[in-house]
């Protein structure tokens, strides 16, 4: 026989419930609370209780006097507010068919209305195609494919996470994905997105060009002509004649074939073939994916700046479930229950209800703590824009608020924050860090990438910088970085190697390979 002493963590059902609630989104949490309200007779909604009492105009005789409220446990977290000093921290409709009816198919509306109007009728001419599945790198499992369908945004966020490493570009890309309509068209111009995020319009345009390379081709177009042009470019069929046809879709709708032949510089047979190619394209690529009833993202956290310059971080009361434990009903049922099994059931319902109330309150307080620390760490982004994102990881937040990294990870999953820069997912505030050569404060990966871009943009044609030379220059400026990291960042920026840039310079082409 042997005597041993040890420690082990027992995951009780209550602890599992608390962990589950912490990582649920506001929509999933509301659904979970609805299930508990149906299952547990001791639970009731706070708003329903208040409305019932107001409508009746009187209280139950079993209820204590007003100065002594009934002993209910309430899961309505107060709308807590944390305040701190920032110094511390085109056309209407179209049918692309020669033998179709083009009359009244196009109007001279602005190009901004094209995605919703022109493509609406063009979609009737195109056969449906199956969409390819996407992968989300956040808690993805193969079992999800058995019961869930891939939406357009899921598919695009998966490509964004795999193809875009720059955290600033991810922020911009995520905002553009959220502005897509169900057909896959941008509903907000890049200039408006750049203004909201505080970044250069050129950077937004660069990210947009990358997103337009995502599958299926044709997404992120601003009008019908651009959507078709993206698909023709992929097929290597966007020649000058086809470009001229896309620029005059209104003439095609009015069946002015003679004028189109003169504009495009082709004969009637060639024009017929060109129109047939248009019919083979998809004017609404976003419809290839499953669509559900649109649910507007409701942020769990609201961030605003006070008149004195401080930042106010508060929970959104609309996302906080208001649940009460009806102790009067429990007292009535428990007093009249004689059967041992029934008494055990009532006791279990009371314990489960009290734990749910406590878990909801703890969830609200934890979200508030994490969000407040994120705002404190990323104040530069809120004030100056995406270029001022600081390097941030889960451990930094966890140590600052005295919690475990896994808790912070669960809090930042499926949660959104409404800021002056827009509604952003909490996980987008976390960016990689590059160590300082002198042991000082680390640099954000975005700042280092921007520095590499500037060095290459300003290099002389007869003095092209190699990756080793870029490493030396960065280390001289206090950035400790490896050569392979420079090469990786250069590839992310779509900048060719030094050897290729020399060849491009010798041939008279812009050496950065992007002009």
Image: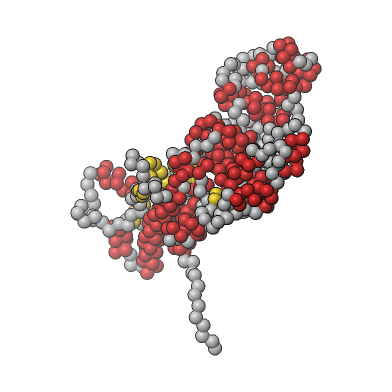
Residue 181 visible within the image = no
Q: Nearer the viewer, residue 66 or 302?
A: 302
Quadrant (top left/top right/bottom left/bottom right) for the N terminus: bottom right
Residue 258 x, y percent position in the rendering: 73, 11
Q: Residue furthest bottom?
A: 1
Residue at 79% in and 15% down: 267
Q: Is residue 325 above or below residue 184?
A: below
Up-down: is 343 above or below 95?
Answer: below
Q: Residue at x 49, y 51 (%)?
A: 412
Against 364, residue 422 (above or below) is: above
Q: Quadrant of residue 234?
A: top right
Q: Is residue 40 above or below residue 509?
A: below
Front residue of 504/35: it is 504
Which quarter of the figure is the C terminus placed in?
A: top right
In this picture, residue 41 sits left or right of residue 332 = right
Give the color scheme: rainbow, by chain, secondary structure or one colour. Answer: secondary structure
Nearest the camera: 194 or 460?
460
Residue 440 in picture, x, y percent from top left:
52, 55
**Identity of the residue drawn at 51% across and 54% down:** 441
**Viewer-side residue, 329 vs 435:** 435
One can see residue 500 in this view: yes
* Residue 372 image point, x, y percent: 41, 50
Residue 170: image quadrant is top right
Residue drawn where x is 46% and y is 47% of the image: 378
Relative to 328, is 483 on the left or the right? Answer: right
Q: How many marks?
A: 0
- Measured as percent of width and height from the top left, residue 146 is found at 63, 50
């Amino acid at each position: 026989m042997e005597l041993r002493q040890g420690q082990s963590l027992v995951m009780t059902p209550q602890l599992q419930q608390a962990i589950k609630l912490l990582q649920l989104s506001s929509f999933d949490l509301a659904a979970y609370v609805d299930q508990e309200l149906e299952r547990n007779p001791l639970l009731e909604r706070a708003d329903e209780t208040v409305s019932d009492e107001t409508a009746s105009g009187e209280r139950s005789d079993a209820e204590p006097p007003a100065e002594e409220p009934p002993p209910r446990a309430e899961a309505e977290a107060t709308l807590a507010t944390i305040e701190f000093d920032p110094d511390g921290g085109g056309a209407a409709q179209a049918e692309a068919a020669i033998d179709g009816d083009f009359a009244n198919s196009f109007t001279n509306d602005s190009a901004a209305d094209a995605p919703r109007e022109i493509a609406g009728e063009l979609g009737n001419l195109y056969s449906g195609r199956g969409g390819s599945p996407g992968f989300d790198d956040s808690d993805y499992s193969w079992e999800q494919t058995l019961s869930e369908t891939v939406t357009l945004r899921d598919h695009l966020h998966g490509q964004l996470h795999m193809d875009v490493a720059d955290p600033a570009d991810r922020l911009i890309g995520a905002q553009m994905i959220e502005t897509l309509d169900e057909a896959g068209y941008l509903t907000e111009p890049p200039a408006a997105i750049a203004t909201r995020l505080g970044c250069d319009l050129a950077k937004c345009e660069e990210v947009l060009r990358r997103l337009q390379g995502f599958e299926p081709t044709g997404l992120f177009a601003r009008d019908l002509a651009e959507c078709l042009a993206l698909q023709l470019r992929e097929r290597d069929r966007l020649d000058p004649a086809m470009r001229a046809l896309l620029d005059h879709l209104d003439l095609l709708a009015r069946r002015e074939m003679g004028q189109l032949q003169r504009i495009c510089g082709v004969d009637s047979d060639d024009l017929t073939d060109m129109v047939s190619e248009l019919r083979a394209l998809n004017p609404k690529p976003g419809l290839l994916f499953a669509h559900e009833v649109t649910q507007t993202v409701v942020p769990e956290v609201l961030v605003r700046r006070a008149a004195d310059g401080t930042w106010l971080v508060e929970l959104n009361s609309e996302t906080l479930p208001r649940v009460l434990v009806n102790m009067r009903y429990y007292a009535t049922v428990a007093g009249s229950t004689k059967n041992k099994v029934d008494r055990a059931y009532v006791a279990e319902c009371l314990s489960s209800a009290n734990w749910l109330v406590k878990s909801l309150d703890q969830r609200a307080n934890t979200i508030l703590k994490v969000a407040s620390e994120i705002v404190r760490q990323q104040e530069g982004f809120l004030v100056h824009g995406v270029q001022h994102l600081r390097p941030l990881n889960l451990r930094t937040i966890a140590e600052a608020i005295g919690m475990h990294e896994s808790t912070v990870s669960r809090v930042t999953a499926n949660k959104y924050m409404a800021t002056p820069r827009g509604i952003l997912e909490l996980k987008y505030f976390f960016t990689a860090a590059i160590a300082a050569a002198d042991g000082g404060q680390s640099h954000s990966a975005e700042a280092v990438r921007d520095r590499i871009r500037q060095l290459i943009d300003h290099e002389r044609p007869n003095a092209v910088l190699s990756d080793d030379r870029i490493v030396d220059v960065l280390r001289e400026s206090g950035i400790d970085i490896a050569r392979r990291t420079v090469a990786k960042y250069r590839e992310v920026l779509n900048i060719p190697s030094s050897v290729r840039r020399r060849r491009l310079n010798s041939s008279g082409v812009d050496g950065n390979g992007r002009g």
